[in-house]
Amino acid sequence: MNLSTLLIWFLRLLSTGLALYELVVGPLVNSVLADVSLPLLSDQVAGTKWFALIFAVTTWASSEKRFWALFFWYWPLVALWACVIAPGNNWWFPSEPLSRAGHQIDGLFYMILIIVAVTFIGTEFALGYALWKSAVRGKDDKVWFSHGSHRLEIVWTIVPAFILVFISMAQLDVVADIRVLNRFPDEVQSGPVAEVMARQFEWRIRYPKPGTELMTTPQPGDLYYVNELHIAATVPTMVNLRTQDVQHSFFVPRMRVKQDAVPGLIIPIWFDAEKAGEYELLCTELCGWGHYKMKARIIAETPQQVSEYLTGLQADQEEDGVADEE
Amino acid sequence: MATITPAVDSADHAHDHGHDHGHHEQTFIQKYVFSTDHKVIGIQFLITTILMLMVGGALALAVRWQLAFPWESMPIVGKLFGVFAGEGGQISPEFYTMLFTMHASVMIFLVIIPVLAGAFGNFLIPLQIGADDMAFPILNMLSYWFMWPAIACFGYSFVAGGATAGPANGWTSYPVLSDIASASPASGNAQTWWLFGLTLVGVSSMMGSVNYMTTIINMRAPGMTLFRMPLTIWSMFITAILQAFALPVLTAAGFMLVFDRLGLLLPTSIQSVFFVPAGLIVNNSAPTVGGGQPLLWQHLFWFYSHPAVYIMLLPAMGMVSDMLACTCRKPVFGYKPMVYSMAAIAGLGFIVWGHHMFTSGMNPALGMTFMTSTMMIALPSAIKVFNWIGTIWNGDIQFTGVFLNCAAFVALFIVGGLSGIFMAAVPVDIYFHDTYFIVAHFHYVLFGATLFGVFAAIQFWFPKMFGREMNDGVQKIHFVLTFIGMNGTFFPMHLLGIAGMPRRYADPYLHGYLEHLLPMNKLMTMSAILMGFSQFLLLGNFFYSMFYGRKVGRNPWNANGLEWSAPSPPGHGNFDVPPVCYRGPYEYSSPEAEALGQDFILQTDPPRRAATTEPATA
Ligand code: HEM
Ligand SMILES: [Cu+2]
Ligand SMILES: [Cu+2]
């Protein structure tokens, strides 16, 4: 008996054992013996037992060739299944998109996901089928002596080309909405409400003195806070993104916003919070050993609450006697 | 002594070459250490890169450990090395940063690039085109020996900043972080040594690619027309061109960064600040005069590194095409489209670098342009996938380890190519950039495709290297374990990316919305450990078979290429008679072959009269 036969026997016994345990022995023991509770993989990840069953059956394929052909069909199924159950297991977006751009981005994501999923299923199935055909071929069947087909090449060049061009065209408007200054929403054309200055390893927020405009250089009376940005919910907000030292990146996952902060540049970005509440803000450009802990939050609340917050901040700052603290 | 000038008439040359060498003895050092024989150099590259693969893998397992068991002390290593004692065997954040930086650097610069061009390029090019050696054998030897100073620089950079913190700026080394030493205080001048290492790897690659281009253009055997070259040769040729045009940019950028780093120690009058804007102060560093642009580095770096990701793939694509034809016993489907799509990938590869910079703050109009070119580069990749499936279609598959690894190459490349489409779309990439989605993508192309291709190639050309074969059963076990481990480790990374988990985080769970992903990370680490340890099967099989594998003859796979008409292993000068090439490399199961009662026909077999009724096309 050679090693590859041994391997297949091993996989047969392993997967059959697993399938029996998940489907029969485990549930049976758990239901008959009241004080025993065997841990079942299927309780952790739904559907495991059915995959164990399919794989177990696969491994009993009558020949090694058939087994390998089925193997190449089996794994895309597992991969697809992982994606199907992902949202239910909370392995998906941290939340519904909570901003205008977020809705657009997610829409495009799902559009690409559908195209990609169909392509994935088609190509992986075809690959597995090619293996299967060979695994079941008769001993005297002739192989297909072919150097290719002009017509097929043309088809599988033109069709994907159209799809790819279509995908890129579909993005253009959204890119413009998010990034091109004169397409920014009307509400933010009046200018930024705050400056977000990243530094190793925190986010420094600077608001203009209430009633004044934000200047690029700090002004007397500006208000400062670290790692917390207050904005008005539901309306678009613009901030100036800067860094005081190395590169950083401003990432608000629930709003699907991301922009690097580049030394020497002031980059205006806009976003909006669809709902009042807290949004996590973190850094997604390697900025040193403490990169992972640049944790901050954006608080979206009513405009009333924002101005109360700023008044409170102003009062605190003046009380300290360090109105012009750096 | 090997000739430095390419032979004008390579056939004659090979002839008297072989005779010369029968007569004088070579010392052990000439033969196995400072050898100018392309086969020895190729094998030297191969063994070096396999060992580096284990080093890079160990670094990766440490990274995975931290992600599954944050801040818990490492098993074995934590106790083994005194340096961790002070930290209770824990991984510190500085150390974690070093780990992922060096993991990527080792894997990219010391494993993937040299194993493809260095090991297989060297070994296969002269054999497959019917030459007696490379055009410039001494340059070739130097290209290998320049790897060692590079390895030394990388190695020294590990400890340059103290025992537990080395280069800490990622393999992309973005300034300003990488430019100003005080921005990563624990690393000292490690980054400078890292840059030296990078430059030396570049020197080595450049010597290789000059050699490959010259050899392929000038030294093909009579009858080996361009369109009779195996796709491996085409891929090596295109890769060499990519290297030659892209690498100087990286080298220049690397020197600029070195000047910046060293310059900041010098009086201000002779400082260079290519990548530091005016007036920037990091952790009390000296203020800079004049102003540079951090984004300039990103442009220069990716101008090289995007073509480089294809340097890390194209040769594997070529080799897999060869191996698929042989293991399926039929011609490569669409040989010319395969060549043209590789050329298209190479051409387009130069105009897509901006897709790494969609969130960098570059002009949004540029982003849209780069998006379109990036989408278009998926097209030749798709064409290749269709043609591989066409090659397998209705073949007589030999289900060996070679075939399984090749099939895995195709199956996994599909995933990597498709995830690329999400990231090519600017709005979607705004969300995915610098998350685990990216990490999933490039592991599917670099591990899933390239490494599986390399596993196949090792087994396929092993008999030619050593005259013995590897154990196929062990290769299959290695394949199954690696395949399961690979998917278990990297597929969930797509989901982590969708969940918004950033890459390069020593402790993602600090952020509430990522906490629940810990169990999944544990599963991934288990898979990674399985995958890592399975590599010992490869290692064991490789070294065992080198000495004790079953002996095989010239053509154990019944393949067509010129290399299979040479002895196994070929002697100095390669062929016993100067080969002449009569047909394309993929005439498996052709009527001409069948007339001989076999399903292959060597490129060197002169056409027989019986077959002239139906001439094989190249
Ligand atoms: C189908 C074609 C491909 C497309 C459309 C594509 C697209 C992309 C895009 C847009 C990015 C940048 C994502 C980001 O950082 O936000 C990226 C990253 C990357 N790609 Fe691809 N890619 C393709 C194929 C490949 C191949 C064949 C390889 C390697 C063999 C590769 C290796 C990489 C690597 C290493 C990175 C990450 C670099 C880093 O940030 O560390 N890609 N790809
Ligand atoms: Cu950071
Ligand atoms: Cu790229």
Image (cartoon, coloured by chain):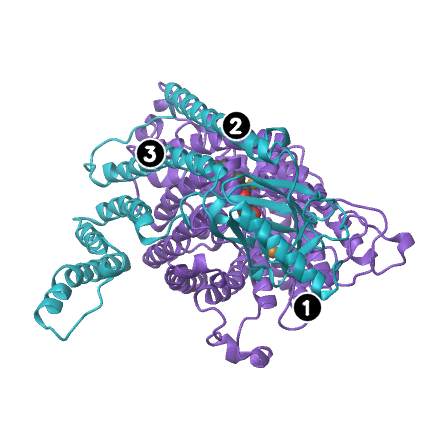
- The percent position of residue A280, horizontal first and vertical second, equals 51, 54
**Quadrant housing residue B329:** top left
Chain name for mark 3? A
Give coordinates of residue B363: x percent, y percent: 65, 34
Q: Which residue is mark 1?
A: B186
Say if mark 1 contacts mark 3, CB within 8 Å: no
Q: CA distance from mark 3 to mark 2?
A: 25 Å
Camera-near label (3 vs 2) is 2
Write the residue at 47% across / 74% down: B72
Can residue B11 be seen from the camera position used here? no
- Estimate the x, y position of residue B435 in percent, counting from the top left: 50, 50
Q: Mark 1 belongs to which amino acid?
A: Ala
Left or right of B434 on screen, residue B497: left
Q: Quadrant of residue A80?
A: top left
Question: What residue is shown with label 2?
Answer: A173
For the residue pair B392 and B352, the one nearer the viewer reads as B352
> Label 3 neighbourhood size at 10 Å, few (<14), some (14-19), many (20+)?
few
Q: Mark 3 or 2 closer to N-term?
A: 3
Q: Which residue corresponds to the image point at 48% horizontal and 33% vertical from the top-left?
A: B378
**Residue at the image point whose x is 60% and y is 78% from the top:** B83
The subunit carrying tag 2 is A
* Callout 2 crowding tier (Cα within 10 Å): few <14, some 14–19, many ≥20: few
Give the CA distance from mark 2 to mark 1.
45 Å
Q: Which mark is residue B254?
A: none
Q: Specify the amino acid type for callout 3.
A: Val
For residue B234, say whether it is visible: yes
Q: Which chain is cyan?
A: A
Q: Chain B shown in which color?
A: purple
Q: Quadrant of the C terminus of chain B?
A: top left
Q: Secondary structure at mark 1?
A: helix
Q: Amino acid at mark 2?
A: Asp
The numbered mark at residue A118 is: 3
